[in-house]
């Protein structure tokens, strides 16, 4: 699979095969790739918690909000929940402004997950105090992002958005998940060949 295929297949999946386990070794491989990604000033402020156990996964799940644009959906059913998570933490002493690092590592892990025939979703809507308490996360580490991982069971359809039109994702009655993307004509501001 080439990079373009990985990018096309790397969607924000929100429904997974709850019976498909993800091993601790797989999670370590994902974090191993995140560990070697570029970092601002090479400060490497990110730390990680991985979970692939049902009890800890359940505690993590309870702190997350899913698909804010789908007002009539409360999130995945128990049999459709992710079977693994990576919690990206920021050591504020090493770099208090690690937003770029978080994005780079999360995207890297998700692309690697797709290559492993898995998928995931970056979840920023997190009840951080509740997650900190549930996992006893030390105060010196800030919760940056939660990355859900599992075997996707939903069809995601990319489609061109109308110029200046809505880019809000939605589900059709057949449960296919549609994601409007702005066209090249709308996002490419200028082209220079010299």
Image (tube, grey):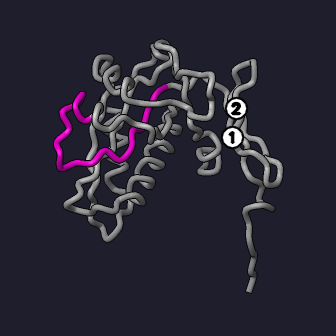
Which residue is found at the position 49% from the left and 12% from the top?
A: 79
Residue 170, labelled with which disc?
2
Q: Residue 151: give x, y in percent of width and height.
A: 51, 25
On screen, 128 above or below 153? below
Question: To which quarter of the image does residue 22 belong?
Answer: top left
Give the residue at mark 1: 168
Q: Residue visible at 45% across and 24% down?
A: 82
C-alpha span from label 2 to label 1: 7 Å
Residue 156 in the image: above or below residue 73: below
* Magenta segment includes 126: no
Residue 46: where, in percent of width, then height?
Answer: 29, 52
| Side of 19 relative to 54 (left or right) | right
Residue at x 54%, y 28% (from the top left corner): 14
Q: How many marks?
A: 2
Rendered position, 27 above or below 192? above
Structural crowding at the residue carrying mark 2, measured as other residues with C-alpha within 10 Å and reported as few (<14), some (14–19) or many (≥20): some
Residue at the limit of the structure toward the bottom, as seen here:
194
Q: Nearer the viewer, residue 187 or 126?
A: 126
**Visible in this render: residue 22?**
no
Q: Are marks 2 and 1 in contact (CB under 8 Å)?
A: yes
């Amino acid at each position: 699979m080439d990079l373009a295929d990985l990018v096309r297949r790397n969607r924000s999946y929100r429904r997974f095969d709850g019976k498909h386990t993800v091993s601790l070794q797989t999670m370590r491989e994902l974090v191993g790739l995140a560990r070697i990604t570029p970092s601002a000033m090479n400060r490497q402020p990110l730390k990680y918690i991985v979970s692939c156990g049902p009890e800890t996964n359940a505690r993590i799940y309870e702190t997350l909000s899913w698909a804010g644009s789908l007002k009539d959906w409360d999130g995945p059913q128990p049999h459709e929940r992710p079977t693994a998570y990576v919690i990206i933490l920021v050591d504020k002493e090493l770099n208090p402004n690690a937003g770029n690092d978080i994005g780079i590592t999360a995207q890297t892990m998700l692309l690697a997950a797709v290559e492993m025939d898995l998928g995931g979703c970056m979840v920023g809507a997190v009840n951080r105090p509740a997650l900190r308490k549930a996992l006893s996360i030390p105060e010196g580490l800030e919760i940056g992002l939660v990355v859900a991982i599992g075997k996707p069971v939903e069809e995601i359809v990319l489609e061109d958005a109308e110029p200046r039109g809505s880019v809000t994702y939605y589900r059709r009655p057949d449960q296919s998940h549609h994601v409007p993307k702005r066209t090249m004509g709308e996002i490419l501001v200028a082209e220079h060949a010299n």
